[in-house]
């Protein structure tokens, strides 16, 4: 049985949900705001419901996930299934079973000022402090990207 808790972060962005969605999930936009988690990180895959996606560091190691639900400009749910290391997806190890599946959900709420973006993430205890430090930086950078020009 996975042992994790859910943490939440939110930010107000002066841009419509469609722009926040597109900026956040584009290859170039993702590489910029997600730098708060690991410099040079990127994704391989698609943001469509049911699609497999990998979140990777420059070393090529990272997370193996699938898109549980994708409602453009409204809601995105990522189901993290395991890790990717040495070119192999690891989804059945004891370590992975201790936390997987873990969900990372994004809600894009249209508000008069633009968008209220809410992030709900399942996190294992040993990653909680790291994510509590990284998410505010990531959201601040995303806000700047969306509000520029």
Image (cartoon, rainbow, N blue to C red):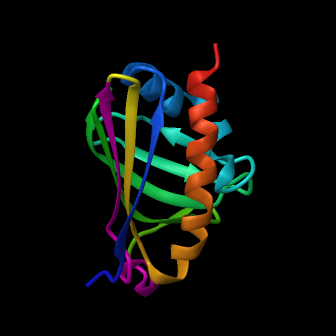
Q: 96 and 30: which one is in front?
A: 30
Q: Name, please, the residue furthest toward the front.
A: 112
In the rendered image, the quadrant that contains the C terminus is top right
Q: Position of residue 17 (x, y in %)?
A: 37, 25
Residue at position x 47%, y 82% in the image: 125
Query: On the rendered structure, is 75 left or right of 16?
Result: left
In the rendered image, the quadrant that contains the N terminus is bottom left
Residue at position x 42%, y 28% in the image: 21
Q: Is residue 78 above or below residue 72?
A: below
Q: Position of residue 81 (x, y in %)?
A: 38, 64
Q: Position of residue 135 (x, y in %)?
A: 55, 56
Q: 34 and 60: which one is in front?
A: 34
Q: Is residue 74 above or below residue 38?
A: above
Residue 141: name its quadrant: top right
Q: Is residue 120 above or below residue 1?
A: above
- On whether residue 97 falls in the magenta region, the answer is yes
Query: On the rendered structure, is 42 left or right of 79?
Result: right
Q: 8 and 23: which one is in front?
A: 8
Residue at position x 57%, y 34% in the image: 143
Q: Name, please, the residue furthest toward the top.
A: 149
- On whether residue 131 falls in the magenta region, the answer is no
Q: 48 and 12: which one is in front?
A: 12
What count of labels does the image hold?
0
Residue 84: name its quadrant: bottom right
Q: Which residues are magenta?
A: 93-111
Q: Position of residue 91 (x, y in %)?
A: 40, 70
């Amino acid at each position: 049985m996975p042992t994790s808790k859910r943490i939440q972060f939110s930010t107000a962005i002066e841009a419509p949900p469609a722009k926040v969605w597109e900026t956040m999930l584009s290859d170039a936009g993702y590489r910029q705001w997600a730098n708060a988690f690991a410099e040079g990180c990127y994704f391989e895959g698609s943001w469509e419901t049911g699609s497999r996606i990998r979140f990777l560091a420059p070393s090529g190691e990272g997370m193996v996930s699938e898109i549980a639900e994708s409602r453009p400009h409204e809601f995105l749910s990522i189901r993290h299934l395991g890790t990717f290391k040495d070119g192999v997806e690891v989804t059945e190890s004891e370590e992975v079973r201790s936390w997987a599946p873990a969900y990372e959900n994004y809600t894009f709420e249209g508000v008069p000022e633009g968008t209220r973006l809410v992030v709900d993430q399942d996190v294992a205890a040993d990653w909680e402090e790291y994510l509590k430090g990284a998410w505010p930086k990531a959201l601040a950078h995303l806000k700047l990207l969306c509000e520029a020009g």
